[in-house]
Image (cartoon, rainbow, N blue to C red):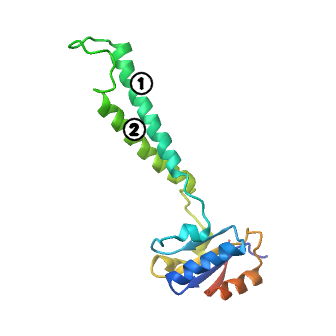
Amino acid sequence: MSEEIYGMVASFKDTPSLYHAAEKVRDAGFKHWDTYSSFPIHGMPEAQGQARSKVPIFTFAGGLTGLTLGTTMVWYMNAFDYPLIVGGYPFFSPVFPFPVMYELTILLAAFGTLGGMFIMNLLPQHYNPLFNCSKFLEVSDDRLMIAIEAKDGQYDPEATKQFLESIGGFDIEEVKA
């Protein structure tokens, strides 16, 4: 009985070598792969060929919803549900209820950001086959890695291993699913 293969991982000695290796993997045309490090690396999304994040769209939608909800709520309470003339002021004015509208805008924008992050990052993800790789666990300490998944159209066990060696990878290991 053969085990299904998840992919292949390779370690790199330092940040510049990981960065340049990521550019080479991107240029080679791989689509299902990622880099792993215990710290953010400036410019890595561009080196990987990733598009800009869609999370700001969720933030904007949440903020716009909050502003609309706050404005509608204040209008409904003051001008429709319980119109009360106080000091000759109009039933509805956007000036006085501004704190309510502002706070709801900020609150729902924050919720939109959090929800967008969870949706776009496919969270929560409680298990990943990479957790079975003993060397991958060292990423949280000082190891820098690239993982190429077997579902990639260009994945071939021998050719991928040779490619990872040619771009400076070491401790190359095939990961079981």
| Element marked by disc 1 | helix
Instruction: From the top left corner, tell me how far across and down residue 120 is, in percent.
Output: 56, 54
- The answer for how far apart the CA atoms under marks 2 and 1 are is 12 Å
Q: Quadrant of the N terminus?
A: bottom right
Q: Nearer the viewer, residue 171 or 75?
A: 75
Q: Residue at x 32, y 12 (%)?
A: 83
Residue at the (23%, 12%) spot, across then down: 88
Query: Mark 2 vs mark 1: which is more N-terminal?
Result: 1
Dot 2 lies on which element?
A: helix
Q: Nearer the viewer, residue 129 or 94?
A: 94
**Mark 2 packing: few (<14 Cα in 10 Å), some, or many (20+)?**
many
Relative to 163, 71 lies left or right? left
Check the image and report above or below for 177 versus 121: below
- Horizontal side, residue 122 vs residue 25: left or right: left
**Residue annotated with mark 1:** 72
Quadrant of the image containing the C terminus: bottom right
On the picture, is 104 further left or further right than 9?
Answer: left
Amino acid carrying label 2: it is Thr
> Where residue 176 sits: x, y (%)?
68, 75
Contact check, label 2 and label 1, Cβ < 8 Å: no
Residue denoted by label 2: 105
Residue at position x 74%, y 72% in the image: 4
Q: Is residue 83 left or right of residue 26?
A: left
Q: Amino acid at mark 1?
A: Thr
Image point (50%, 85%), residue name: 14
Look at the image and tell me whether residue 85 can be seen: yes
Q: Is residue 104 above or below residue 9?
A: above
Q: For residue 17, which quarter of the picture? A: bottom right
* Residue farthest left in this picture: 87
